[in-house]
Structures are given as structure tokens and as C-alpha cells.
Image (cartoon, rainbow, N blue to C red):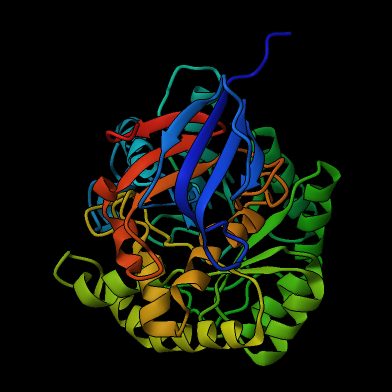
Amino acid sequence: MPQAEMTAIKGGRLIDGTGARPVENATVLIEGSRIAAVGREIEIPAAAKVIDAAGMTVMPGLIDAHLHFFGAKSDKMEARLFRPKELSLIKSIGDARALLEAGFTTAKCCGGTNALYLKRAAAEGTLTGLPRIVAAGYFLSQTFGHGDIHYFPIDCVDARTSRHGIDTLICDGVPECIKATRYALRQDADFIKVMATGGVLSPKDRPADVQFNLDEIRAIVDTAAQAGKFVTAHCQNSPGARNALLGGVKTLDHGNETSDEIIELAKERGAVFVSSLAISRVIVEHGESAGMAPWAVEKAKAQEELMIGSLQRIRRAGAALAAGTDYIGSPLMPLGGNAIELEHLTRYCGFTPLEAIVAATRNGAMACFLGEQTGTVEAGKLADLIVVEGDPLADIAILQKAGQIKMVMLEGKIEVNRDLR
């Protein structure tokens, strides 16, 4: 077999994503798609291509652990619902490329079938320049749940029967939950997304509502596990989080109202929380002027303080938290601007810049069920790396400036190079 190409990124400040302090003048040696060695005293083979990162920061590629490839052109819900699905899919190609250009090497799409096609097109080589996509595809919602689109008649809200491009599977009771899970898996889901509570961007239910019974959640988790898959839950209150955790769910997303009891239960069960401050902030600050429904803006305002308090408690307790934005590619929530979540974690929730980076690297990989493969700069892991001009520990906001992301490497292949040699 031909020998794999070797690349050495030399002389940079290394932030490895584990939470360890930075290492100055470090070398990262890459062989093929994986990291071969990391450290200060690494012998560089003569055949290796050497990239000079002196004065720059080398770190894992960023991970958004909760977004949606909706390909949205508007922030008005009704405009998104009635836009042709094909146009949304086409726009989502550019959205995915913008993520990679901004240093995001992995994106977890927590609902939306566009992601299934983006992932498959990248795998067959039809599309290039996309991040690694981990996709749920269809949402699972109970009737009168957060994924039940209340604008529509009841016979139009399930993807299996609707002509409206709906991405929801409605299921009630254990047999229906099992069948919906199998349907999502058949459509190439990497994980199952379940709505365990009510939410903000749905008109009739409330974030305080508990959705799905424990036996229904257990049925979904057990069915997914039979295919080696995990379950992520939309979760905005503690009773819903308890059901999700007891049912075997592995990630709890949003966490607007999370008690100390739930945090300890999540730690016991190895679950990961996922933040979504970015969407909350834009709805509160700009939702009304963007034409979002007044009820959505009011619910977001009521929930934001709860979310910030929950994230602060999660941090103090030392529970695993991954960074997500819930961005959808709309004008208010552009894909590519996702590193704003790291700034929000530091500004509102007391995270240090290093803790925020861990949330968007190591913990993000855990939330994508890829913790053994990526998320940190360690020997044996996939070479998903970025080289940043400047020091994000001194100014976390520089990660929002695509021009300062000088290089993006995905599985050892340089996908973006802004004059780095």
C-alpha cells in the first residue's frame, strides 16, 4: 500500500480541546486522516509537508452540537413552511460550506431532512467543501407536541402523509414510537431526535409542558439502540429532562430550566447538556423587528433568564456541556456565525474562554457521539484542525471572524487555506 501523506503543523500555540493549558511552539504531525503525534519535541520526517503556524493558535475544529440545515431565507415561520423544499435544500449547500469556512468541521443537525441529503452527497463526492454532518433527519413528536406544526390541520403534520415538506413524525404510544424510530433510521438517521418538552417556536405548547411518557421515551431509546444509535432530546424543563434521562437519552438540548437534581442525574448517566443561547439572544433582541410571531418573542424573553441560570449551574457542577446555537441559516441565524455561542457562554454564564472552547470541541464531539474520533488534538484521532490568527483565550470573539481562521483541516485534508504556508 502507498504510504499516507504526512503534514506537520509547526510552531503554533496549541489548545488541544481537553481543557489543558496551551502549549507554546507545539508540533502536530498528521499522517493521512489522523493525528500521528503531538508535542514540543516531535521529530518531523523529511518527507512531511511543513506548515508554519508560528504566532498562531492551533486547535480542534469547532463543533456546533445543535443546528438545523433548514436553508431558511426568512425568520418568519410561515415563510419557511411554505417555501419550496427544493429551494431550501439548495440554499443549505451554501450554508454548510459557510460553516466549514468559519472553522466548523462538524455540525450536528438536530432535525431537518436537508442534512440527510447533504451528508449523502458529500459521501459520494457530489458535493465538496462541507463539514462532517451528523444528522437526525426527522423529528419525533407526540400529537400536540413541539414538533407538531400547529398551524396546519392534523392530517398535514406528519411527514409520512403530508405534501408540505414536513420533517416531523407524529407518534403516540409505544407501538407508534417504535415504528417512527424505525422509519427515521430507515431514512439514514445518525441519531434520533425526540421532543421531550414544549418549546418557544411553537404556538400552542409551552416550554413547561412535559411531552412523551417515560415508557414512550424508553421505547424510542431501546429501538434506536438496537441499531447502534443514540437519542437526543429537545428539553426545556426538569420533569421532561428526568423522563429523558431515565429513558436513556444521551443529550439534553436547550436546558432552559434545569435543577441541581437533574444535573446530578445527568452526570451519573453520562449525559451531555447542549446550550442554545445564540437563538435565544437573537429572538429577544431582534425577533420582533424581523417579523417573528409576538408569542414566540414573549416566550423567548420569559425563558432566557432561566436558560442562563441553568447553564451557570451546569458549569458550577462540572457537568458536560456542549455548545450549540440552534441556528437555521436565516438572516437572524446565519450558519457560519455560530462561534457567537462561545462569546455568549463567557459573557452571560461565567465560562472562561478555555471552558467555552472545550464546549465547542471535546464536549461537542461527545454530544455528536464522536468523542473517540474527534474533538481534541490527540494522537490517533481524526485530524480535524483549525489554525487561528491570534489568541482566542485572550479574545474569544476572534473565532467569529472567518478571515482569522487561516486554515481548516478535515480528516487530514486542507479544506480552507487563507495564505498559510
Image position, residue 347 (x, y; %): 36, 81
Image quadrant occupied by the N terminus: top right
Q: How many marks?
A: 0
Image position, residue 278 (x, y; %): 36, 68
| Residue reaching furthest to the left | 289
| Residue reaching furthest to the top | 1
What is the quadrant of residue 319 in the picture?
bottom right
The residue shown at (30%, 77%) is 295
Image position, residue 381 (x, y; %): 67, 42
What is the quadrant of residue 36 in the picture?
top right
Vertical comparison of 81 with 127: above or below? below
The residue shown at (50%, 80%) is 256
Vertical comparison of 294 with 99: above or below? below
Vertical comparison of 382 with 111: above or below? above
Q: Is residue 45 left or right of residue 397?
A: right
The residue shown at (43%, 75%) is 345
What is the quadrant of residue 395 in the picture?
bottom left
Asked whether residue 134 is in view, the answer is no
Report the front residue among 46 and 370. Answer: 46
Q: Is residue 51 left or right of residue 90?
A: right
Image position, residue 263 (x, y; %): 68, 83
Image quadrant occupied by the C terminus: top left
The residue shown at (38%, 83%) is 348
Vertical comparison of 266 with 217: above or below? below
Report the front residue among 333 and 24. Answer: 24
Asked whether residue 148 is in view, the answer is yes
Report the front residue among 225 and 313. Answer: 313
Q: Is residue 101 left or right of residue 128?
A: left
